[in-house]
Image (cartoon, rainbow, N blue to C red):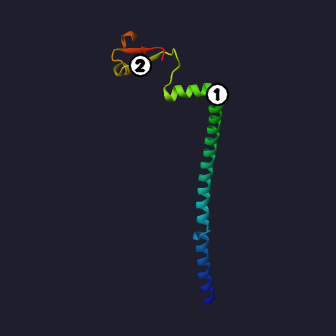
Amino acid sequence: MKIGRYILIILLILGYLILFGKNGIVDNYRLGKKLTALSAGNEELAREIESLRAEVLLLRKDAKYIEGLARQELGMVKRRDLIYRYSGEAAAAPKDVNREAGTFNTEIQAGL
């Protein structure tokens, strides 16, 4: 009888260690979920790296791409481009829908 109790206690301790120990089942499950999340993050970063490499190639070789970026991000213009600037009231939605387009306060600049 005494031996049976010792064996039972040893089995309970081993079971606890197998489930909750450093390399136990619960720890293994947690690490598996973390590995899945990290793998998904790595794939996302790999896609971002590829898109950045493609953009670097465009910046090195494609003058039209550079011109488009300068126009879009820096607001640059070419000679003889027309620039339309609307005042704050004209940029907002008009209250009277039947107003003609010529009644808006518009400034046109040419040859910048």
Q: Which mark is residue 62?
A: 1
Where in the figure is residue 71, as x and y percent of width and height? Answer: 52, 25
Q: At 63% from the left edge and 51% from the top edge, which residue is drawn?
A: 39
Q: At 59% from the left edge and 70% from the top edge, which residue is drawn?
A: 22
Under circle 1, the secondary element is loop
Give the image quarter of residue 27.
bottom right
Under circle 2, the secondary element is strand
Compared to residue 93, the image places residue 15 above or below, namely below
Q: What crowding class fits label 2: few (fewer than 14 Cα within 10 Å), some (14-19), or many (20 or more)? A: few
**Res 86 seen here:** yes
Where in the figure is residue 58, as x and y percent of width and height? Answer: 64, 31
Q: At 62% from the left edge and 76% from the top edge, which residue is drawn?
A: 14
Disc 2 vs disc 1: which is toward the camera?
1
> Which residue is at the far bottom?
2
Q: CA distance from mark 2 to mark 1?
A: 30 Å
Total marks shown come to 2
Label 2 sits on residue: 85
In terms of depth relative to the viewer, which is nearer, 41 or 28? 41
Indicate the quadrant containing the N terminus: top left, top right, bottom left or bottom right.
bottom right
Compared to residue 88, the image places residue 9 above or below, namely below
Q: At 52% from the left edge and 27% from the top edge, which residue is drawn?
A: 72
Specify the amino acid type for callout 1: Asp
Compared to residue 26, the image places residue 87 above or below, namely above
In terms of depth relative to the viewer, which is nearer, 92 or 53? 53
Are dots 2 and 1 in contact, CB under 8 Å?
Answer: no
In terms of depth relative to the viewer, which is nearer, 47 or 31? 47
Mark found first going from the N terminus, 2 or 1: 1
Give the image quarter of residue 10.
bottom right
